[in-house]
Amino acid sequence: ERISLNFDKTFDFISKDSIFSYKEAIENHNRALFNKTGKGNDFLGWTNLPTSISEAELADYEATAAKLVSKDIDIFVVIGIGGSYLGSKAVVDALSDSFAHLKTRKNPFILFAGQNISEDYLFELRELLKTKEYAMAVISKSGTTTEPALAFRLLKQDIEDKYGKAEANERIVAITDASKGALRSLATIEGYKTFVIPDDVGGRYSVLTPVGLLAIAVAGFDIRALVQGAVDMEKATGVDVPFEENLSAQYAAVRNELYKSGKKVEILVNYNPKLHFFAEWWKQLYGESEGKESKGIFPAAVDFSSDLHSMGQYIQEGERTLFETVLSVASPDREVRIPTDTADLDGLNFLAGKRVDEVNKMAELGTMLAHVDGGVPNIQIVLPKLNEYFLGQLIQFFEVACGLSGYTLGVNPFDQPGVEAYKKNMFALLEKPGYEEATKAIKKRL
Ligand code: PA5
């Protein structure tokens, strides 16, 4: 069984023919992706990553996770930012009980650090960790990113103070480049367990490397099923798959044609709040891959029906530059039926006997029709269930589509030159050694 894609509700805005006119170009882009001949081709390791993950690697992630869990930890802290953070956060949230943090669990709760520079966040996290048993992973491909390095400097001292250096070192896993960067040297000196992020896999495409898989395994989820879903999607979108059968190719074509027709903002919609951080992962994937050279769709996200009572107004009647991609989960995991109430004071007896999901689904259908009527084209992606296997499919589906979409737009989807600008200013303002000239120049502007 596969996830499915439906773009009928874009045909009032763009023609089916115009979408299929991308066939030849996108099939060429797909060959450039999978044969690793396209732009940014030193970062195309993720295309066949799922089928290249070995049994030994999976067993190592599982064994490392089991060893950490066997220390009876309450919390596993993942230190990382961007692609070193959002993949595991997305998958763990999508699969977790909504109230896992307040319930008794077999596996530790996953918390994150180094994904911001908030002093309050770090203070409060450190206070919490004083009262809990914990272990941590520090993740940085470059090994030099300021946010996680700063968080790790603090948390490393705390964990050493709490457990003593030898035991602390048993509780720290470092995930970084095979040889480069400060984190690699530090891990070697301290003797941490380490995992390598492959050279040819960029941060936002790295969820199926140890960057994502270790934390997902620590949280107690089935990384084999996740990888299997990605393997099946890798095959279903691979080099020789024709446009008519390739869901990633079709999604890339539809969104590029919508963009050309003036739809500059894509909103990823969910009707299950567990997918909130999946949308954050997707925003990073598409925003960082396509937003360059003064072009690219702006990726946004909403959680419905919550946001129908806030952003719903804008989507229905604001600027007509939007389209929506709805992530729909066909069947929920749990069952809640609406009871009959003899007094019926709330007037809801017309729903009695129905499942809550039926109401959610009618909200979804009604919203899609209303938004299309209001001038917002809708794409729908259906996951049969919210589980590891279909999430694995969805991840690979979106990654391939992102590569194809970026190539169609004419950009390199695998670099991110624009993220350096803020760093330069921040280092100049902080008077980092080596930035003396930049410091002088920036201070004149203040
Ligand atoms: O997608 C990317 O390359 C970025 O978002 C990185 O993942 C992010 O900047 C973190 O980089 P690093 O893992 O080198 O600390």
Image: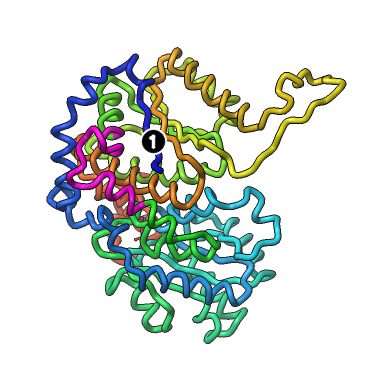
Residue 382, image x and y in percent? 44, 35
Three-letter code, disc 1: Ser
Using the image, determine if residue 374 lies above or below residue 246.
above
Occupied quadrant, residue 58: bottom left
Residue 238, image x and y in percent? 23, 47
Occupied quadrant, residue 249: top left
Residue 315, image x and y in percent? 48, 21
- Residue bearing the label numbered 1: 4
The residue lying at 32 percent from left, 64 percent from top is 53
Tag 1: Cα neighbours inside 10 Å, few (<14), some, or many (≥20)? few
Residues rendered magenta in the picture: 230-251
Using the image, determine if residue 409 lies above or below residue 370.
below
Q: Quadrant of the N terminus?
A: top left
**Direction bottom: furthest residue:** 166
Q: Pick whichever, 159 or 401, lies toward us.
A: 401
Q: Pick whichever, 119 or 34, lies toward us.
A: 34
The reply to whether residue 126 is visible in this rendering is no
Q: Pick whichever, 28 or 356, lies toward us.
A: 356
Using the image, determine if residue 404 lies above or below residue 160.
above
Q: Pick whichever, 347 or 293, lies toward us.
A: 347
The residue lying at 30 percent from left, 37 percent from top is 247
The residue lying at 87 percent from left, 21 percent from top is 343
SS at mark 1 in the image: strand
The residue lying at 34 percent from left, 74 percent from top is 184
Residue 37, image x and y in percent? 12, 51
Is residue 234 found inside the magenta-colored segment of the image? Answer: yes
